[in-house]
Structure formats: structure tokens, C-alpha cells
Amino acid sequence: MNNCIFCKIIDGDIPAEKIYEDDHVLAFLDIHPVNPGHTLIIPKNKNSQNIFDIELPDWEHMSRATHMLAGAITKALNADGINLRMNNREHAGQVVYHPHIHLIPRFKGDGLIDWKGNSYKEGEAQEVLSKIKNELKYV
Ligand code: 5GP
């Protein structure tokens, strides 16, 4: 965790195209953009890996920056929309183990393929709902 690539960007040890920075978060262009303007927002704290262990104040700072940057990126690039995405753990596509939100501007006809919706089997939705509700900590 301490040697992660994003920690090096925070420390200025490797370069990045920085868009926004404050005491808590840093936003910079993804080095392999899905579309031009593809941006990553990260917390400056280096004590977490993903959504499962990030502290709530860091998450709130990321959320605030995401809200601001989503509008700015979309307007600046005349995008038709924007995707917010966060990969958490290996099988959800996480490669860099420092929390990060992807902001991906979208353009009409850009051809990016999104996931396809499925259907629930009889009773499956209620079963899933019940399992999730049992785990909720804040209700
Ligand atoms: P993940 O799959 O972990 O959600 O995404 C990691 C992202 O970090 C990828 O989209 C990748 O292109 C980006 N990335 C990896 N290394 C660097 C780097 O050194 N600089 C920048 N700007 N982006 C990086």
C-alpha cells in the first residue's frame, strides 16, 4: 500500500497531469484514458485500498471533488454525459490498490460498451434484498 503508484503521484515522485488538488484529494488524468478527459480522483491519505476500508471523511472529500469535477469535465469537453466508476478488489477490476474514482466523459456514439442488464428469477430479488438489509450498519 505504501509503495503504490498513486502514493508516488501524491508525493510528486512520478509526474501526473493534475487537474485539481486540495488538502484531502488529488485529481489527475488517467494515463490510459478510455476517452479524453478520463480522470481519477484519489484521497491523499495513504491508509486505505478501496471502498471497504476508506475512512468516511476521505470518502466525503472524494465525493465532493467528484461532484465538482463531473460538471467541469463535462462542460469543458462538451461531453454528452459522464460515467463515474470505482473498481473495488481484483474481481471488480481493481489494479491499483489506492482508492480511486474514475470519471469518464461520454460522447454520443463513442461506442463504449456498458454492462447489460439481466432479469431476476422468481423470488431472487427478495432474497438478495433480505441479505443486503441484514448487513446494513446505518439503519
Ligand atoms: P483500476 O483498474 O485500479 O480501477 O484503475 C487503475 C487506473 O490507473 C487505470 O485506468 C490506469 O490507466 C491508471 N494508471 C495506472 N498507473 C498510472 C500512472 O502512473 N499514472 C496515471 N495518471 N494513471 C495510471
Image (tube, rainbow, N blue to C red):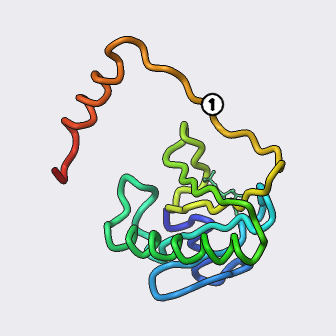
Question: Which of the four quarters of the rendered structure image does ligand 1 lie in?
Answer: bottom right
Taking the spot 37% from the left edge, 52% from the top edge, the residue there is 52
Which residue is depicted at the point 63% across and 35% down?
115
Residue 133: quarter of image: top left
Residue at (81, 65) in percent of width and height: 36
Residue 121 versus residue 101 in the image, above or below: above
Quarter of the image holding residue 58? bottom left
Residue that lies at the very extreme toward the top in this rendered image: 122
Closer to the camera, 131 or 18?
A: 131
Q: Is residue 119 left or right of residue 5?
A: left
- The kind of residue tagged 1 is Lys
Dot 1 lies on which element?
loop
Marker count (numbered): 1
Q: Which residue lies furthest to the left in this view?
A: 139
Q: Which of 79 and 131 is in front in this view?
A: 79
Does residue 18 appear to the left or right of 26 in the view shown? Answer: right
User: In the displayed structure, would residue 76 be above or below residue 84?
Assistant: below
Above or below, comparing residue 34 to residue 30 in the picture: above
Q: How packed is label 1: few (under 14 Cα within 10 Å), some, or many (20 or more)?
A: few
Residue 46 figure quarter: bottom left
Residue 17 in the image: state x and y as whole percent.
74, 79
Judging by the rendered image, the residue that carries numbered circle 1 is: 116
Residue 125 percent location from the top left of the image: 35, 23
Toward the bottom, the furthest residue is: 23
Q: What residue appears at the point 78 percent right and 57 percent down from the top-left corner?
A: 107
Point out residue 38 in the picture as x, y percentages from the top left corner. Answer: 72, 64
